[in-house]
Image (cartoon, helix red, strand yellow):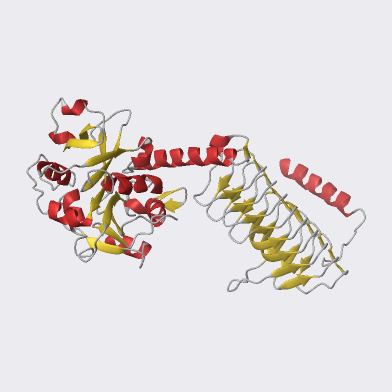
Amino acid sequence: MTKTAAPLAVVILAAGKGTRMKSDLHKVLHPVAGRPMIEHLLASVAELEPERQVVVAGHGREQLEKALAGRVGIALQEPQLGTGHAVQQAETALADFAGDILILYGDVPFVSAATMRTMLDRLHGSHQPPVVVLGFEPPDPLAYGRIVADGDRIIWMVEHKDATPEQRQVTLCNSGIMAVRSADLFALLARVKNDNAAGEYYLPDIVNIAIDDGRHAAVVITPDPEEVGGINSRAELALAEQHWQASRRERAMADGATLIAPDTVWFSWDTAIGRDVLIEPNVVFGPGVTVADDVTIRAFSHIEGATIAGGAEVGPYARLRPGADLRVGSKVGNFVEIKNAVIGAGAKANHLSYIGDADVGPQANIGAGTITCNYDGYFKHRTVIGDRAFIGSNSALIAPVRIGADAIVAAGSAVSRDVGDGELRLVRGEQLVKPGWADRFHDAMKKKKADKAQ
């Protein structure tokens, strides 16, 4: 990590009601790639090692306090009177802070640490600007505020609602993200007025006030407009997910994985994929998955909270749940579910099985339809299957139970007591044979059916 030259504080605005999201969940807690959007932003901020972090909250404050417990300060904005007013609410928390202040937005989650550093470097560059604004040039400027600039020097900033037709022709837009010297921020904010179309205190007005004072405000332009894309609705959330996934798929392939149908593979924010990994279509990764080199993941598999070692094979139609630990060369086949279980090196569970709360030894073979009965209605219990053990099809292993090394459990057995090394355990009802019984049954039933039809 590279720490900025001056002490750094971060103010994240998250006080909006998020009405367009139509949700009881706070807008910035909605996930992208399995991670709340504000956590994406905080992860990038962490690379700069800030001394202070303040989230300005309003509606849903309790949710933010719970989600971010102890990691950031929370300042309340009530009522919400604009972005300038929102930043003012952090003044008490930063009263004794001297350094640089980054102003970010909880619903703009993908601003990179590199972009933040560029803004902070410009803050300490030529002319020592009091404010640096992050600008962008979208394909369609829509209703964004505009930045009128000469080179990187800002001449004027204006909100779309207050812009003249000529100003609306400007394509350089204001992201709202700023780097400001702490010595200037709150003094400038105190001079902001609300004599505008919305009757709000606009944060960008601090730039115009500094310009009126004869000072040099600067703009840094991101080359990637998607970096500053805000998320205000379910549709925009889906679009952000789409962009994030596309980028992650490209990275996976660049790092040496093969994705047969990239658009059908869905990664989580922390998915780790090795080299020479083959991923077939329609695979979904939830949080907490690590995949080593030379792994094959076949179609329609769902994997979360799992570790998959080199040379293992998963699926098709497999489900790996949290705690699944597949060792080198193991195989989990179609319609097999693994939960909180170790599948030893070279072990196989090829078909239609549930292996939960278990330790399966190396080279063991789990027959089709086998289940570990791990829950007694009150507590979970563990099943241990020894090295090279063979579990016959349609067996139920009733935990807690231990199957020894090289042991065989005969097909159709319900095993409730330990099986020793090298033993055969067969637990079935006695098979009865009644010669001619089926023929007599069919004859009687046919006669009964014929009599009923008359």
Residue depicted at 38% across the width and 36% down the height: 224
Pick the residue in front: 314 or 57.
57
Pick the residue in front: 132 or 325.
132
**Observer able to see residue 152:** yes
Residue 426 in percent (x, y) is at 85, 66
- Relative side of 45 to 134, left or right: right
Q: Residue furthest left?
A: 195
- Relative side of 6 to 375, left or right: left
Residue depicted at 23% across the width and 51% down the height: 180
**Observer able to see residue 22:** no
Q: Quadrant of the N terminus?
A: bottom left
Residue depicted at 24% across the width and 41% down the height: 218
Residue 184 in percent (x, y) is at 17, 54
Above or below 407: residue 164 = above
Residue 4 in percent (x, y) is at 36, 55
Count of labels shown? 0
Pick the residue in front: 447 or 262.
262
Residue depicted at 28% across the width and 45% down the height: 125
- Quadrant housing residue 166: top left
- Relative side of 26 to 36, left or right: left
- Quadrant housing residue 345: bottom right
Q: Quadrant of the C terminus?
A: top right
Q: Residue furthest right?
A: 435
- Relative side of 142 to 308, left or right: left
Residue 303 in percent (x, y) is at 59, 51
- Quadrant housing residue 195: top left
